[in-house]
Image: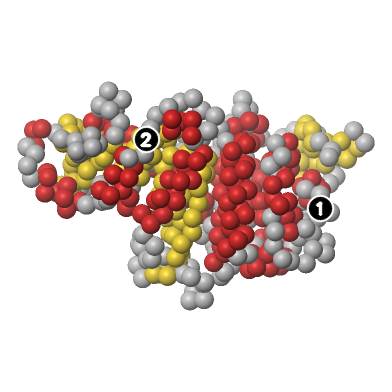
Amino acid sequence: MDRITVSNSDCNQETTSAWLASVLQFGLDINFFAPFKAFSLKMKEVRYYVYQKLLTIIASIAMGCESTKDINEVLGPEKLAANLLGMERFPDQSQINTLLTRTGEENIKQLQSIHNELFGKHSLSTASHNDVIVDVDMSGLIAGGKTYEFADKGYFPRKRGKTGYQISAAFAGQYSEAIALYLDPGNTHCQNRLEDLLESVLSKYPDQLRQGKLIIRAGSGYGALKNIEKLANIKGLKFAVKGYSTTQASKIAETVPFGSYTQADEATWVYELPPLENGVRRILVQILGTKGELTYTILYTNMSREKLSTVEAFHFYNGRQTIEAFFKMAKDTYGIKNLRTRKFYGIYTFLWMVFMTHNLITWFKAIKLHGTELEDVGVKTLVKKCSRITGFVERTIMGIKVSFHPLVNWQNC
């Protein structure tokens, strides 16, 4: 496979998205695409293999396509990127739609296996010698119609009465790595997937678990006492979870004098309650609302006071906003809020491709953009803006060279 080199130039010839070509070349360098060849789906393979259609989905996600219909326009001109993946040109949207509508439960298992293989080989977090913090959470996807397979009414913030699906995920925010994914009908409660998420996380971090350096953070939906006990019984695992019942927290607060709290920020105070029988710490959190009302929650953690003070535990828990930001990015940048098909397993398939593409971009940033002017540029900017910067392609017997006009300013991409 010809390699790509990059330089400045004022030539005018075949063009390509330098972003897409660079990400795909990186994927080839680390053998990222090889496991997809094992993906099995009964489809005619006339001009394209099934796995090449999966790679087309990866390219469309990296280029910020908001729907499959964008594939023709966005990927149509990307001849070099297609060539890198062994294709003369990318397949059109109709072939991608057909693939998504034909996938089934067995294909989801295949994609999960591919993800696990790639994560095991390339993850940055699994190689860490420091604490690895994994956030688990659920986020809803609205289905804008009545014919979406397995869609159901459920909890969708500010979308009361809507039908759709729930995504359960595990995410290592410090490394921006997607760890686990599950898709369910909209009426599924988040705690129904806790055991599956834990199994997926624990299997990927055996060293950190053994060393007491694996930490789970989870919201109140996972905070029933039976779940706290389950977490506490996993040897080596650390956690910080918000309690499920605000009513119980309010009753406990009636017994705590106002002067006993320690201020954590301008509108929050915390108080260390006696621990549970199993030694799990309980931290009562008092929050002053904008209208002067007081609300209470309980934070559960098995991390010692030497490691985290009461105030530090509160701020540590609030760090779980990283997974909320990931869900927002997945919806707005990778376009998962625009469901690619009405078939449940087709939606599930696309989500898995998004999670794996995100990890590819994360590793590309960490390895190839480290020390460059793009190192601190966010994924949204890279996918939505930098991806539209084109370079000029020169094909020679020595390889492929991509040049840019001298006036290109990457800092403003």
Closer to us: 134 or 139 = 134
Residue type at mark 1: give it: Met
Task: Decide which of tag 2 and tag 1 comes sooner along the chain.
Answer: 1
The x and y percentages for residue 235 are 37, 35
Residue 235 — which label? 2
> Splitting the image into 4 quarters, where does residue 216 fall?
top left
Residue at the right extreme of this rendering: 397
Q: Is residue 335 above or below residue 265?
A: below
The x and y percentages for residue 348 are 55, 60
Q: Is residue 109 above or below residue 8?
A: below
Q: Is residue 125 above or below residue 36?
A: above
Closer to us: 14 or 24 = 24
Do we see residue 74 in this rendering? no
Q: Nearer the viewer, mark 2 or mark 1?
A: 2
> Splitting the image into 4 quarters, where does residue 49 fall?
bottom right
Q: CA distance from mark 2 to mark 1?
A: 49 Å
The x and y percentages for residue 225 are 25, 48
Judge from the rendering whether residue 407 lies leftward or rightward of residue 335; answer left or right. right
| Residue at image coords 14%, 48% | 250
Residue type at mark 2: give it: Lys
Dot 2: what SS?
A: loop
| Residue at image coords 72%, 66% | 42
Closer to us: 388 or 27 = 27
Judge from the rendering whether residue 412 lies leftward or rightward of residue 285; answer left or right. right
| Residue at image coords 69%, 62% | 41
Do we see residue 247 in this rendering? yes
- Quarter holding the N terminus is top right
Residue bearing mark 1: 87
